[in-house]
Amino acid sequence: MATARWVDVQLFDYHTGFRAIGSIAPPWLRIPQETSVICMIIKPDQGSRPVSACLHCRRPALLVLLCLTMILALVGCGRGSEQRVLVLRGATMGTTYSVQIVEPPAGLDRDALAMRIETRLAEINALMSTYQPSSELSRFNASSGTDWRPVSSELVQVVAAAQALSEASAGAFDVTVGPLVNLWGFGPTVTADALPSVLEIEQARARVGWQQLAVRHQPPGLRKAQPNLYVDLSAIAKGYAVDQIAELVESVGVDRYLVEIGGELRGRGLNGRGEPWQIAIERPETSKRAMFRVIALQDLGMATSGDYRNFVEIDGQRYSHTIDPATGRPVGHRLASVTVLADACMQADAWATALLVLGPERGFELAERLGLAAFFIEHAQGVADDERFATQATAAFETLSAQPR
């Protein structure tokens, strides 16, 4: 029997979707050149504790640790078998998606399911994209009237959820904040090379306000209080899409899966090892990639918002892409990232943004009061941003993220 120590190499690539290679002896460890992200290297005798990691990821929020173990023989000595995992992947919403299905039901048509997923994602984009001029939301934004405009019940559902969360967060979450986002250089076409003036900020703020958007369920419709109101659902739509794909795969008899779109996730059941899905929260550093904490995700949605990857520097000062609708300016607190767990990924997605806007004190107090499962990572006072962090987790987060025993 060979004595070489073998490792499980688990990969996640946001450019091409999920990818994994199996157990490889270190002297002959080879990583395919086309693989851009290595998430974790694990020694079998140390369980799921990472002993080496080299991380590089487009999505700052999360690094998904794939829990796939390949079937390999070690010079005649079997290592057991992994349950079958079907992986579907593609592009959507300006990012990528991936669906992992453990032990697919007998007779499941892979190609038919893949087509249904693509079709459903295209339908959601056609309703809620601000990058497609023909989308239902883009047509509403382009309209100049202030009368009720008929829209789909699905668009109303998401906008109504956003408005409810705006009210619960006292306006920290606001889908009308787009003019301010664009002003500070974080929109799809505008890049700021100078600070906006006080007048420009106030003019943009006049176009912002969730109370200026009305929602009607029957018949479904939206109405602007002012003609140039602009609605952007990017902080909630990906989470909604994750939930929709999760429901789709459940409808064909799947009860163990992980759905991911642009770093927003929803997992059900156990992974291929028979364990909860292992998900890493990234250490919020601008200079390097590293894992901060790994949690167990089972029957929950998960989303993270952070300020450490998407920012602009103007005159040597760094400005976060997270805009506070109340001030019209980037947030100035030391909160680096917020991770939220919820039954629905749509709720996790939106609340992660709202709590990041509110900051470490107000955000944590609200999360505790509402029973939200939230994990806060804050830059420590008096220490360089990329050196040390302080954390706090709500009671609900500690309960939901604990590894089942």
Image (tube, rainbow, N blue to C red):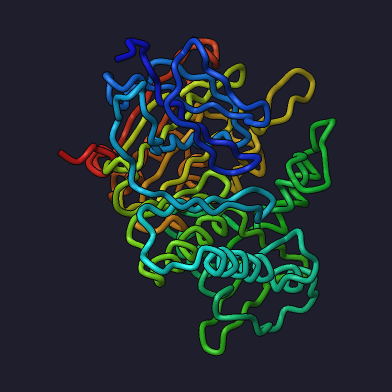
Rendered position, 334 above or below 384: below
Left or right relative to 333: residue 368: left
Left or right relative to 176: residue 278: left
Which residue lies at the image location 63% right of the left edge and 29% below the top edge? 36
Task: Determine the residue located farthest toward the left in the rendered image.
Answer: 405
Which residue lies at the image location 41% right of the left edge and 49% below the top edge? 85
Task: Determine the residue located farthest toward the front in the rendered image.
Answer: 76
Q: Quadrant of the C terminus?
A: top left
Question: Residue 380's spot in the image, x, y percent?
Answer: 45, 17
- Residue nearest the observer in this picture, 316 or 138: 138
Asked where in the image residue 251 lies, by quadrant, the reply is: bottom left
Question: Residue 388's spot in the image, x, y percent?
Answer: 45, 13
- Residue nearest the observer in this picture, 175 or 402: 402
Task: Determine the residue located farthest toward the bottom in the rendered image.
Answer: 219
Which residue lies at the image location 54% right of the left edge and 15% below the top edge? 386
Asked where in the image residue 148 lies, by quadrant, the reply is: bottom right
Q: How many marks?
A: 0
